[in-house]
Amino acid sequence: MEMGVRQIIGYFLAYAVDIARGLFKMERLVVHTEIEIPVVDIPRIGKVHGPMDFLTSPAAGGLSMGSSPIKRELMVIRYSHVAI
């Protein structure tokens, strides 16, 4: 996949994950890039393996992710006309 396309997909997934965190109450949902997967047999496709370009999953742990006070302050400054 070309780098320019990967960046666009990455931005899209980052915003989608940010929205999904609120909708599904999954604060620890994250996007990983280039994750190596073992051989998996997919019906009617066959065996696939190698690096996945993108993978979304919940992260282990208990700390909140993506909702720091600094980020909220920057969002208020950037989007001052939108109630957060």
Image (cartoon, helix red, strand yellow):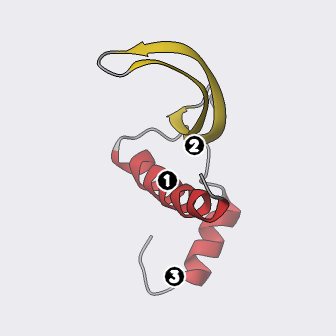
> Which is more toward the observer, 46 or 80?
46
> Which residue in the protein does label 2 denote?
31
Task: Locate the C terminus and report the quarter of the image it occupies.
Answer: bottom left
Disc 3 to disc 2, C-alpha distance = 24 Å
Above/below status of 13 relative to 74: above
In the picture as drawn, the residue positioned furthest to the left comes out as: 44
- Report the amino acid beneath label 2: Val
**x and y, in percent, of residue 75 in the image:** 58, 73
Q: Name the secondary structure under disc 2.
A: strand
**Contact (CB < 8 A) between labels 1 and 2?**
yes
> Which residue in the protein does label 3 denote?
79
In the picture as drawn, the residue positioned furthest to the right comes out as: 70
**x and y, in percent, of residue 70 in the image:** 70, 65
> Which residue in the protein does label 1 denote?
13
Q: Name the secondary structure under disc 1.
A: helix
Image mark for residue 5 = none
The answer to whether residue 61 is seen in the rendering is no
Q: How many marks?
A: 3
- Report the amino acid beneath label 1: Leu
> Which is more toward the observer, 27 or 6?
6
**Which is more N-terminal, label 2 or label 1?**
1
Residue drawn at x 65%, y 74% as measured from the top left: 74
